[in-house]
Image (cartoon, rainbow, N blue to C red):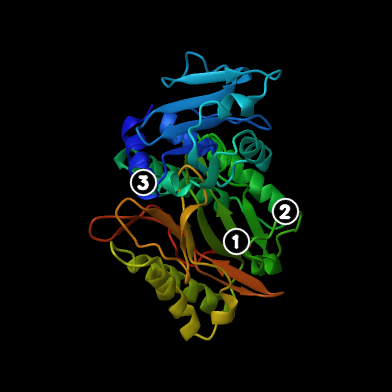
Amino acid sequence: MEKERIARVVERMKKMDLDQTLISAPASIFYLTGKWIYPGERMVALYLDVHGRATLFANRLFALSGTVDIPLVEYDDTEDCVAILAEHMTPGKIGIDKDWPSRFTIRLMEARSDLTPVIGSPCIDQTRLYKDEKELALMRESSLKNDTSILNTIQQLKLGLTEAQVGDIYLKESAAQGSTGPSFEPLICFGANCAEPHHVTDLSVLKPGDSVIIDVGLTWRSYCSDMTRTVFMGKASDEQKRVYDLVRAANAAGRAAVRPGVPMREIDRAARKVIEDADYGKYFIHRTGHGIGLEVHEFPDVSASSEAIARPGMCFSVEPGIYLPGRFGVRVEDLVAVTEDGCETLNQAPRDLVEIEI
């Protein structure tokens, strides 16, 4: 049990005027207990009160007895798990995990009319936001392994490969680095598909003149990486070069803006301004970045509407892009960690223009 982390969650519970909360996200349970539990359709919930008392509720199928150093209440498939949980609540407000299934939430409210549910996730999300030195070290390692995996993948690009085949190459390369799996499904785009920021990797075939977006991440000791590089199959056109240089400059500007006390919206503005000043602003159609850690998408957003402020220990992506519908797209993404006096870029893979010889 991570007592120091639990203490920090409790302090945030006090600020939210919460005497009790239920934590159900697998990553958050791991963060506080050191144990990954994937419940499927069954209920797993970590109950935490404002005095720091914690109890884990889980099905006996997960065989947790003796594997966690935290009070454990088990149930089996013949028992009403929500009724068992309800017996341990105290009247009043209770924080509910933002992703806890409604099939449990509604039943808990029916069983305990003296409970008032509120979204309790900020108390754990805000704690996970600030990575400690152990976490930062794992984030660095994850990113460097991802660097090697993506560079090895780029070296194997050749005409006739499909997007899916390139994705498979990346998965093999990341496995060779010791990854326990991807942090998300490899996002591989060729040519006009690169104009879709969240294109689903398909069987499109790599052709001369295509831009190639490789947006990938791996998991290393539970911590996620995420980066994007764009390369060109053969000689890039003048416009492709111009767009690439703009996106690379926007990435650099965004990273240069990161330091303690800077609002996330200003980091977004720094990257976006480079693209807007070149009259490509309408083709940068997503936020500049997102938080990352145990999950590939965490709080905060790096966007024009974000209220978050950069503080030491935060990790997030800087990933500007330009997407020209029906033609091509470019994205360059790196992860950064906010330091005491600026920022550390976790990725070391080069950002130079790459033209694959054909």
In the image, what residue type sits under mark 3? Answer: Arg
Lower position in the chain sequence, tag 2 or tag 1: 2
Residue occupying image coordinates x 44% and y 79% = 274
Q: Residues within 10 Å of mark 2 (few under 14, many from 20)?
A: many
**Residue 204 rendering spot, x and y as whole percentages:** 75, 58
Farthest right residue in view: 203
Farthest front residue in view: 114
Left or right for 273, reference 235: left
Lower position in the chain sequence, tag 3 or tag 2: 3
Q: Secondary structure at mark 2?
A: loop
* Discs 2, 1 touching: Cβ within 8 Å: no
* Residue nearest the viewer, comparing 92 with 265: 92
**Residue 298 rendering spot, x and y as whole percentages:** 49, 51
Left or right for 331, reference 169: left
* Residue nearest the viewer, comparing 83 with 123: 83
Dot 1 corresponds to which residue? 213
The quadrant of the picture occupied by the C terminus is bottom right
- In space, the residues marked 1 and 3 are separated at their CA atoms by 40 Å
- In space, the residues marked 2 and 1 are separated at their CA atoms by 13 Å
Residue occupying image coordinates x 69% and y 65% = 193
**Residue 14 rendering spot, x and y as whole percentages:** 35, 45
Dot 3 corresponds to which residue? 12
Residue 162's tag is 2
Residue occupying image coordinates x 39% and y 53% = 315
